[in-house]
Image (cartoon, rainbow, N blue to C red):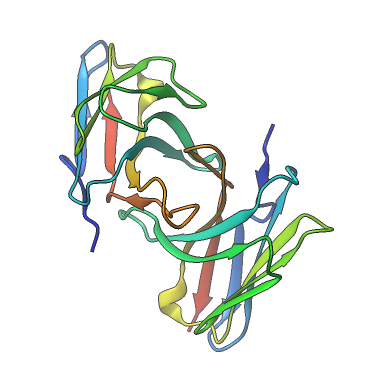
Amino acid sequence: DQQVKQNSPSLSVQEGRISILNCDYTNSMFDYFLWYKKYPAEGPTFLISISSIKDKNEDGRFTVFLNKSAKHLSLHIVPSQPGDSAVYFCAAPGTYKYIFGTGTRLKVLA
Amino acid sequence: DVKVTQSSRYLVKRTGEKVFLECVQDMDHENMFWYRQDPGLGLRLIYFSYDVKMKEKGDIPEGYSVSREKKERFSLILESASTNQTSMYLCASSRTGGQPNQPQHFGDGTRLSIL
């Protein structure tokens, strides 16, 4: 059972526009969510997180929104840059371990 | 900065071989993890360890074992490699306690091919 789902395997966006990556979850007990970014041939790197007591967290060009009633979170990148082209994973922590979505490959077109 | 180092970036082995993947972290993290990443399947947890000599099965432990004799080192072992274990293997570490939900720090991965 996939507790964290990323239903869009890929997304293409024009440079300078907004990228919106989506993530749905099924377990209402999750109280924290993270986004990771992964370039080819590198390990994922932590990007931004949000606690369930918030509905928004912003860090520079990256903003994560959380809608608890819909069990949905999204990552907004504004403006998108070619260097943002990567695979993005959302994740939720369980006891000791993390549950990752399947990832969305973002391609920012110059 | 946290450094998680995986011993090999690329590895080619034959079916039936015993394969060792090594991972070392330098930040005194309690927790260490082994994942594999496959297209369309995301990151799947193989095993994790929350202390020296402790190990817990993840979601796909079959065909793998692990060893954690020292806090900084976590080894993944493929007992008898098979072609369906061809994958990208990622090691990660994280801290327990303090700020909740410590993010995991990943190594750069080992791309393993089993022929």
Look at the picture and state if B72 lies above or below B99. Answer: above
Rendering quarter of residue B57: top left
Q: Residue at x 21, y 15 (%)?
A: B18
Rendering quarter of residue B67: top left
Look at the picture and state if A45 lies above or below A18. Answer: above
| For residue A25, side relative to residue A59 (left or right) | right
Look at the picture and state if B48 lies above or below B104. Answer: above
Residue A91 horizontal/vertical position (percent): 56, 51
Residue placed farthest to the right in the image? Answer: A69
Q: Residue at x 28, y 12 (%)?
A: B79
Look at the picture and state if B80 lies above or below B91. Answer: above
| For residue A50, side relative to residue B100 (left or right) | right
Residue B27 horizontal/vertical position (percent): 22, 51
Rendering quarter of residue A100: top right
Identify which residue, B93 or B43, lies in the foreground.
Answer: B93
| For residue A86, side relative to residue B91 (left or right) | right
Residue B9 horizontal/vertical position (percent): 20, 44
Residue placed farthest to the front in the image? Answer: B98
Instruction: Count the marks.
Output: 0
Identify which residue, A62 or A95, lies in the foreground.
Answer: A95
Residue B70 horizontal/vertical position (percent): 17, 30
Q: Residue at x 78, y 59 (%)?
A: A68
| Picture quarter with the N terminus of chain A | top right
